[in-house]
Image (tube, helix red, strand yellow):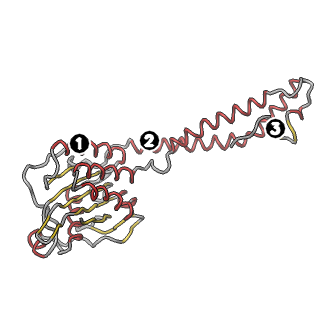
Amino acid sequence: MGNDYKKEARRQYFKYFCGWFIAVGVLLIVVIAVVGVKTFLNNRPRGNNMAPEERVYDYADVLTDAEEEKLRSQIAKAEKKLRMDIVIVTIDQSVEGWEAAREYGYRSDDWEVNMQDLADDFWDENGYGYNKSYEGDGVLLLHNWYEDENGSQNGEHISTSGRAEDSLSIYDLDQILYPVDRYYNTDTYKAYSEFVNAVENRLDISVGFDFSNLLGAICPSTIVAFIYAIVNLRQSKAKDTTAVNAYVVGGKPVMNAQRDELLRKSVTKRHISTSSGGGGGGGSSHSGGGGHHHSSSGASHGGTSHRH
């Protein structure tokens, strides 16, 4: 008789917990599937093999060769993680006024417009973009070190493309450029290194909701719940003659415990020219992206500038 009572109690316990176990099991399957898709996407090969291997163009000559190499290594690791191209370009030339416009072929005398055109055109003409050239995924930092007799033209522009353009708001872009503002005049290498870190932090798809952490939390919880049910099932409240209601009250189990819930840089300096008839200025948003506009080639870009 005792065995019959225990079998009935066991049946009632499993009936009570069945829905919870099914729900957790379905959730586990969904999480595992999402983690699998994420892993597959993270391991996708680069889709654009036409762009240069170079990522650091120090035309202003503000970095040492060793610092350039360290930046290239850091960028390579960030690109592998983000699946986006990251390019840094420094220049030392006037980008403001009609005299500069005539000399370099700018479409405007405005500093910000010309910085935007230079950054966008450099990206487009070199065919950057992790998944494809022309509107492929990635960001480019253009830092101008030029100082004229009327004051400094020093400042930087960030150009975004593809998924980076859609993902980064103006607020995000400002946060990414602030390390350059903070360190460029005291530690140029640190300014650009922190720029890469800021790009990585803002674009890392694992930030905000890490499925692997969720999986790690669900598995122990499921195991604990299962053990808890089994322990309560096996606990004897009485001898074999105890009725089944000693195990089950009202069709639900009785709980005994409390319940818890490269290309190389040329040694000679060069001027960066922009294509004539460049695209419109930034400022409007597009699909959540900041500073949406089109370059002279018609490519879609986002971006913003900081002037020192």
* x then y, percent, for residue 68: 19, 45
Front tag of 3 and 2? 3
Q: Check the image and report above or below for 259 versus 98.
A: above
- In the drawing, does residue 261 fall left or right of residue 116? right
Tell me the residue that label 1 is attached to.
Answer: 70
Could you tell me which residue is drawn at 24 percent across and 45 percent down?
71
Q: Label 1 sits on what residue type?
A: Lys
* x then y, percent, for residue 245: 89, 35
Estimate how packed mark 1 is, as few (under 14), some (14 to 19) or many (20 or more) residues with alpha carbons within 10 Å: some
The answer to which quarter of the image holds residue 74 is: top left
Q: Residue 39 carries which label?
A: 2
Could you tell me which residue is drawn at 17 percent across and 52 percent down?
57
- In the drawing, does residue 192 fall left or right of residue 29? left
Q: Between residues 151 and 260, which one lies in front from this camera angle?
A: 151
Q: Between residues 55 and 258, which one lies in front from this camera angle?
A: 258
The N terminus lies in quadrant: top right
Tell me the residue that label 3 is attached to.
Answer: 253
Front tag of 3 and 1? 1
* x then y, percent, for residue 154: 19, 63
Q: Residue 53 carries which label?
A: none
- In the drawing, does residue 76 fall left or right of residue 96? right
Can you see residue 265? Answer: yes
Q: Check the image and report above or below for 136 versus 42.
A: below
